[in-house]
Image (spheres, helix red, strand yellow):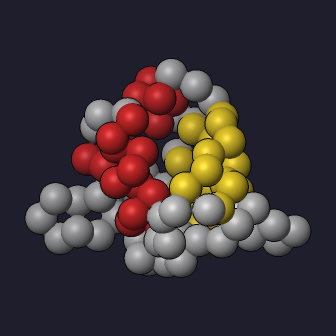
Amino acid sequence: MKKLFLRYVAAAYPITNQLMEECETDATTLRELIEELDGRYGGFCEMFVDAGSGKLTLNTMIYYGEEGKVPVAVLDIDQRISDGARITFW
């Protein structure tokens, strides 16, 4: 099980109603994590994943940083996630 540090800013905040949280998950990719978060926060997946193409939407951003590294913008929704990562949904 991975422990992740999640932040929600801009349009993601009204869906989650919180700015940040620690999350324990068995998800191995960002796609799996987004689907899991959609179960908690309805509409989360729709915000970040285009239903037609299955790719990231163009009007949102996700920043991913492994522990001890500078966060970078995500381009691949199937990117693997690791324990201790910090992820910002924006």
State the residue lying farthest toward the front: 1
User: Compared with residue 39, is residue 64 higher up or lower down, i.e. above or below?
Assistant: below
What percent of the width, then of the height, locates residue 70? Answer: 80, 68
Residue at 49%, 77% in the rendered image: 79
Viewer-closest of 70 and 21: 21
Q: Is residue 82 left or right of residue 84?
A: left
Query: Number of numbered discs present?
Result: 0
User: Compared with residue 52, is residue 78 higher up or lower down, i.e. above or below?
Assistant: below
Q: Is residue 72 visible?
A: no
Viewer-closest of 58 and 18: 18
Q: Quadrant of the N terminus?
A: bottom right
What percent of the width, then of the height, locates residue 63? Answer: 61, 60
Residue at 53%, 77% in the rendered image: 80
Q: Is residue 52 visible?
A: yes
State the residue lying farthest toward the left: 52
Residue at 62%, 46% in the rendered image: 23
Quarter of the figure with residue 50 = bottom left
User: Compared with residue 27, is residue 4 higher up or lower down, i.e. above or below?
Assistant: above
What percent of the width, then of the height, locates residue 30? Answer: 47, 65
